[in-house]
Image (cartoon, grey):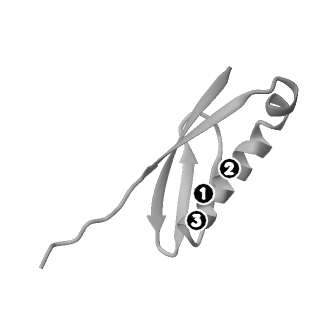
Amino acid sequence: MFMLLTFIIKKEDKFWTAKCNEEDIFTQATSLDTLMANIKEAVELHFEDEIKEKKEKIQIVSLSQVEVGAVA
């Protein structure tokens, strides 16, 4: 059995933020690479019991918001 979690990722000022749609999970970081590691860690901590006891598999889907400017 596995669970699917989706995260909305946004760049807000100096920070990248990630908010889960299905659970109350939020994290932030100054780089996208660090944010992805933070998401994984936050999910592992949030579902620690399910992962250990039930051998639950969790899939993470991330959706990023990117700003596009005018092309010269």
Q: Is residue 19 above or below residue 70?
A: above
* Residue at mark 3: 33
Mark 2 surroundings within 10 Å by alpha-carbon count, few (fewer than 14), some (14 through 19), many (20 or more)? some
- The x, y position of residue 18, in whole percent, is 55, 53
| Quadrant assignment for the C terminus | bottom left
Left or right, 69 with respect to 40, comes to left
Instruction: Determine whether label 1 and label 2 are within 8 Å by CB.
Output: yes
Left or right, 41 with respect to 72, comes to right
Q: Amino acid under label 3?
A: Asp
Identify which residue, 22 or 4, lies in the foreground.
4
In what element is the residue under mark 1? helix
Left or right, 7 with respect to 72, comes to right
* Residue at mark 2: 40
Query: Which label is found at residue 4?
Result: none
Disc 1 from disc 2: Cα separation: 6 Å
Query: Residue 25 appears in which quarter of the rendering?
Result: top right
In what element is the residue under mark 3? helix
